[in-house]
Image (cartoon, rainbow, N blue to C red):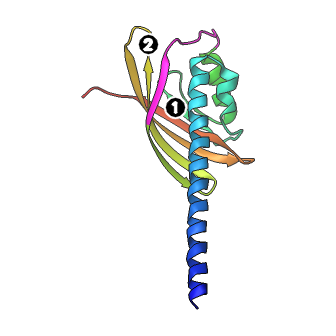
Amino acid sequence: MKCQRYFLLLMLLVSSTIGFAQRKTDELAIRAVLEGHSVACLDADADKAVSYYAHSPYVATAFSEPGYHRGYDAVAAAYRKEFANGQKSPDKLTTKAYRYRIVGKAAFVTYIETYTKPDGTSRTSHKAGYLEKENGRWKLIGNFWIPEQAL
């Protein structure tokens, strides 16, 4: 009887450790998608930026320019138009305050990005992303951000 209790306790401990490890792995993979997308945008690389999105009619993105787009093709066209001149940004990206809500193959994440120019001035955006696993890889479905407002 005592042996069964120890075995049960050991199994519970092992299963909770595996769950925690998977969650951490997912968080790191999601963060890599979000930051990779932002770096691709700084590099004005439309194809790379779009590669972080799922190829789905449910994809949506909203940002100040050029606006709100729905569906993979519309999102891809907006990125290609936005980065048509290929002008890379010299800004440095930092991120913080990630909050993850992962349920199965879907995740909602909020976080803060700050872009610092070479002259030291910066701008901060509050971002929200909805991601889903597509063929085992996290992909953006919804990507939204607004500039931080001074109070």
Q: In the visual, does 2 lie left or right of 115? A: right
In magenta, the rendered stretch is 84-96
Rendered view: 106 above or below 113: below
Q: Which residue reaches farthest front?
A: 3
The question of residue 89 being in magenta is answered with yes
- Image spot of residue 116 (x, y percent): 43, 17
Within 10 Å of the Cα at label 2, are there few (<14), some (14-19), or many (20+) other Cα atoms?
some
- Nearer-the-camera pick, 102 or 18: 18
The question of residue 88 being in magenta is answered with yes
Rendered view: 138 above or below 23: above
- Image spot of residue 126 (x, y percent): 42, 33
Q: In the visual, does 109 lie left or right of 137? A: left
According to the picture, the residue beneath numbered tag 2 turns out to be: 117
According to the picture, the residue beneath numbered tag 1 turns out to be: 62
- Nearer-the-camera pick, 110 or 11: 11
Most frequent secondary structure within the magenta stretch? loop
- Image spot of residue 104 (x, y percent): 61, 57
Q: Which residue reaches farthest bottom?
A: 1
> Which of the 4 image quarters holds residue 146?
top left
**Amino acid bearing label 2:** Lys
- Nearer-the-camera pick, 69 or 16: 16
**Amino acid bearing label 1:** Ala
Give me the C-alpha separation between circle 2 and circle 1.
23 Å
Q: Residue at x 28, y 26 (%)?
A: 150
